[in-house]
Image (cartoon, rainbow, N blue to C red):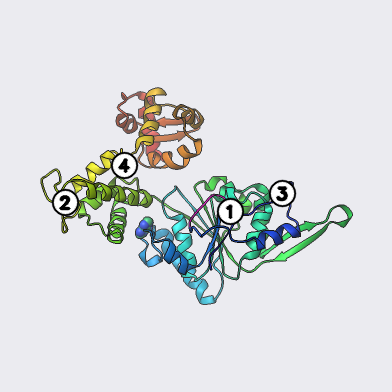
Amino acid sequence: MARERVIREPKADGAVSAEDAKKAATAKPARPPVPGAGGSVLVRSSPEEDDRVAKDLRPKRFAEYIGQSTVVDPLGIAVRAATKRGEPLDHVLFHGPPGLGKTTLAHIIAREMEAHVTHTSGPALERPADVVGLLSNLKKGDVLFIDEIHRLSHAVEEYLYSAMEDFRVDFVTGSGAFAKTISLPLEKFTLIGSTTRAGMLTAPLRERFGLTYHLEFYTDDELTLVVKRSAGILGVKVGPDAAAEIARRSRGTPRIANRLLRRVRDYAEVSGDEDAGGRATTGQDAAVSKDMAAEALRLEGVDELGLDRLDRMYLQTLAVNYQGGPAGVEALAASLNEEQQTLVDVVEPFLLKIGFIVRTSAGRRCTQPGMQHAGAAPSGKAAKATQQARLV
Ligand code: ADE
């Protein structure tokens, strides 16, 4: 039976009392489960329910997973070995840009280990009582998935140290002369942490993960396979050239590929029966053509390289308003009226990867190809930034 709990009534000083822990551990279910949800909602679901509820495009098993072989291969071995020994898997940390499959892999691990997964996030665990409540509810072999683990408060993080290492949490009851430390034993569980900012994790937390993996952007070929697989699940016929076109414009990110595929499907469903070349496109047997996919993506504001409106505005601001930089991310965020975190986590990683920008100690700089894409005149500064990008 899936359960979901919202933890309330933390103590003002952030300490955990025995009462807090008990309250948190026995809180009643509030709403139906939403596997994969973040925010303050804590979800506990079984693999069977994931099947029923999350009828989405994400792979459910390692065997279905495309790409990331440097992660999936060793992880698969670790999972099989732990299963064979009848032990929980070591704690796992995934880091890398958003949309590359960190959450998907966490759920695959749980499924492969036939374990229950409790899904939460760093910002949702406001007080130590929140995390102690979750931990004390875990059964042997369960998976606790903490998304955005770099956003845990220091107080909460400290409770995780002994939980991860010794499978116990210590908390104090009473005060003054009556203060007593109680050690609460926990079942052996697996913590899976996910972050877009590995650098923001403290060393003591980072060191407690036995398995640490960085997720890389996907190649166009891998993304083409992802698009074809998803098209099969959605029941939409996509020609090989169209699949490759969607993949090419997906910024190395399966989440984007699947979103663009859905938009292409929408476009194909409502547009006429002919593509730009006059060929049938939406008849029973017609597959979406490359031209139709390209037109749908153009309408979505996705350009030839897969950059969207925010990517282009970022590039334009750096290239034109700041004459190629250097510009601090704070200044760029203010100019774009955007969250700094969105720029750092969502926009910059792909622009860095394709060599359109570089990060220097003085700030962000636009390279020559970046200037060109933004329609700005070439400059000596940009040429220097291009050299720097080549050195990375
Ligand atoms: N859908 C999203 N990511 C995927 C992946 N890595 N493999 C297969 N399908 C996916």
- For label 3, the residue is 14
Which residue occupies the extreme left position in the image? 278
Q: CA distance from mark 4 to mark 1?
A: 34 Å
Q: Quadrant of the C terminus?
A: top left
Residue at label 1?
206
> Which one is earlier in the sequence, the residue at label 4 or at label 1?
1
The answer to whether residue 304 is seen in the rendering is no
**Which residue in the protein does label 2 denote?**
281
Which is more N-terminal, label 4 or label 3?
3
**Residue 192 x %, y %:** 54, 59
| Magenta region includes residue 38 | yes
Q: Disc 1 versus disc 2: distance between alpha carbons?
A: 51 Å
Q: Secondary structure at mark 4?
A: loop
Q: Earlier in the sequence, mark 2 or mark 3?
A: 3
Crowd around label 2: few <14 · some 14–19 · many ≥20 (10 Å): many
Q: Quadrant of ligand 1?
A: bottom left
Q: Is residue 213 magenta?
A: no
Q: The residue under label 2 is which amino acid type?
A: Thr
Q: Which residues are magenta?
A: 36-41
Labels 1 and 2 touching (C-beta < 8 A) = no
- Going from N to C along the chain, the mark reached first, 4 or 2, is 2
- In three-dimensional space, the C-alpha distance between marks 1 and 3, rounded to whole angstroms, equals 23 Å
Q: Position of residue 34 (x, y in %)?
A: 49, 57
Residue where numbered disc 4 is placed: 306
Residue 351's mark?
none
Is residue 140 found left or right of 313 in the rendered image? right
On screen, residue 343 above or below 157 = above
Three-letter amino acid code at the position of disc 1: Arg
158 on left or right of 313: right
Which sits earlier in the primary sequence, circle 1 or circle 3?
3
